[in-house]
Image (cartoon, helix red, strand yellow):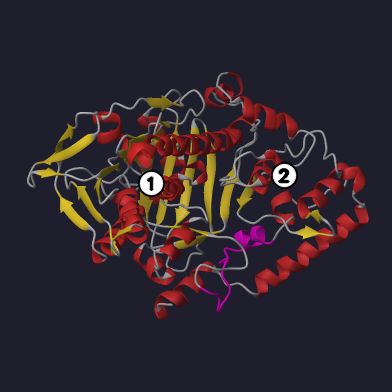
Amino acid sequence: MINSIAIVGGGTSGWMAAAYLNKVLSVGGAPIAITVVESDDIGIIGVGEATVPTIKGILAMLEIQEWEFMVETDATFKNAIRFQDWLNTPGEGVPGNDFYHLFEAPPVISGFSAATHWTSLADRGAQPRRFDLAVGVQGVLCENARSPKSEGGRPYEAPVPYAYHLDAVKFGQFLRRLAVGRGVRHVVDTVTEVRKGPEGEIAGLLTQANGELQADFYIDCSGFRSLLLGGALEEPFCDWSEYLLCDRAVACQLPHASADVPLRSYTTSSAKEAGWIWEIDLFTRRGNGYVYSSRHSTPERAEEVLREHLGPAADGASMRHLDMQIGHRRNMWVKNCLGLGLAGGFLEPLESTGIYLVEVALSIFVDHIGTGPASPYLAQRFNGKMQSIYEELRDFIQMHYVTSNRDDTPFWRDYTSKVKMSDNLKYKLDLWTFKLPTITDLDGKLTLFGPSSYAYILAGMDRLPALGNHLSPYVDPMASAQALREVELLQEQALKGSREQREYLHKHHATGR
C-alpha cells in the first residue's frame, strides 16, 4: 500500500498532482502523506497559458471557486483557437484564410448535424457562410469578443463549452497555496542525488539541506530534465521530431494597448515561415510567442519574426528562448515512479494540451494505483493508455500541418514531403475525403478532440470533404437551408444573452463572484 508520495518539482504539474492526490487518496481517513520538494535554483518554465475545457472538471473536483481561480491566475475565457495564414496567400483579411477551432459541436437539426447540412448545400454548389461561422454559435461569440458565460450562470457552466487563458506561473502558485493549506508538505531544497534500492526502484532523495527524503512512491515533475524517470531510472525517450518539426519557442509578455481594448475570447495561432505565433489575452496583459523548428530557423531569426509580427509594441520587450523535447518517455510509470508534465512527455502547444496531459495522467494513475504483485500489470496498462493518448494528440496536431496547402518555405514543404505520418492518420485523412468525421472514426474512448474538432480543422484547410460528403444525396437541401437559418437564430439569441468579455470580467472582478 502506498502511504506516502514525494513529488520532485513544483510548477503547475507538481502542485496539481499534490492537490489532486491529496483530495482523492486517503489512509485511515486522513489524506495520504505528500511532500513536494522544489528548488529555488531551478526556474519554472510557465509559458503555457491556454487550456481545454476538461480543466473545469479538476478545478470543480478540488472545490476551487471559479472566480477566485480566475482572479488569482489573471484568467480570461477561451471559446476557441483562431488559425490565421495556415493556407497559401497569407495575409490579414484574405478571404478563407482564417478559421476557428471551436469547442462547440454543431447542433443536430432535423436528424442531421448542422455540419452535414452545410456540406449538403456546399456539395450542391451553394455557397453557405464559412463553415465555423455557420454551424454553431461559438464562432460569432469569438467574432464579437464575447464571454461564453451568461449572466447568472452557475460556476463552471455555460451555454457552450469553454476553457481559460491563464498565467501558468500564477496558477502553479495558486495550487501550491491550496495544497499546502490542505496539509501537503512543502520542502524548498535541491535534490542532489537519487538513491536506488536493490530492485532498481527509487529508495530516497538526497537533498542539499534536508538530508534524505523517503516515500513509498515518487512523482517526477522536474521538467525536461526528468531527474527521476529519465535520469535515475534511465527510461528512454521516444523522440517524435520526425512527426512534429517545431522544437523551439521564443516568448514575451506585453501590456494591453489600452485599458478598454476588447479581450479576445480565443487563442490566435498565426502561421509563419518556420512555425506559428500564439497571441493570448489575459486580464491584465498579453502573452505571445513563436513556436518554430530549429531545423528551419535560428533563435535570432525567430525573435525577429516575433517582433515583426507584434509591431512597435514589442520594441524593447524582453524575450525568453526555450528548447522543447517533442515526444514522451517510453513508459511514464516505471517501478515506483511516475513522470508527469514535461518529465513524462511534451507535444508542441498548438492545441493547448499541456495541462490536459497532467490531468488525464493523474486520473488514469488513480484508477490503476496499487502495490504488490499487481503493480507491474497496472503500470503496464497505465503506460499503454497514456501512449495511445499521446499518439492520438500527436496525429491531431500533425494534421494541421499536413492538410495545409502552404509550400512557400522549406518548413512547409518538409511537412508535405519529409515528415513521418502514422498509418492511422493516413487512413483517416483518406476516409475523410468522402465523409465528415464522425465518432465512429475515432478509436479512443479517452479522446480529447471529438469529430467536430477534426471537422473544424479540415474545413478551415478547405478539405471538408474533398470528394463530397457521402450523405449529401440523402439530405433534403431545403431542410438544410432551414437548418442553417435556425443556427442563425441561435446565434442572434447567443449575442443577446452574452456580454463582451472585458465588460463581463470587470463586473465579476469587482464583485468577486
- Name the residue nearer the viewer: 173 or 139: 173
**Residue 308: which disc?**
none
The quarter in which the C terminus is drawn is: bottom left
Residue at (64%, 74%) from the top-left corner? 497
Neighbourhood count class around disc 1 (C-alpha, 10 Å): few under 14, some 14–19, many 20 upward: some
| Above/below status of 288 relative to 374 | below
Q: Give the mark nearer the N terminus: 1 vs 2.
A: 1
- Extent of the magenta region: 137-154
| Above/below status of 81 relative to 175 | above
Q: Position of residue 495 (x, y in %)?
A: 66, 70
Please say whether residue 138 is one of the residues in the magenta stretch. Answer: yes
Q: Nearer the viewer, mark 1 or mark 2?
A: 1
Residue at (56%, 36%) from the top-left corner? 392
Q: Secondary structure at mark 2?
A: loop
Amino acid under disc 2 = Thr
**Residue 369: which disc?**
1
Res 303 visible: no
Please say whether residue 48 is one of the residues in the magenta stretch. Answer: no
Q: Which residue is mark 2?
A: 438
272 left or right of 198 in image: right
The kind of secondary structure the magenta stretch mainly shows is: loop
Distance of mark 1 from mark 2, alpha carbons? 33 Å
Amino acid under disc 1 = Ile
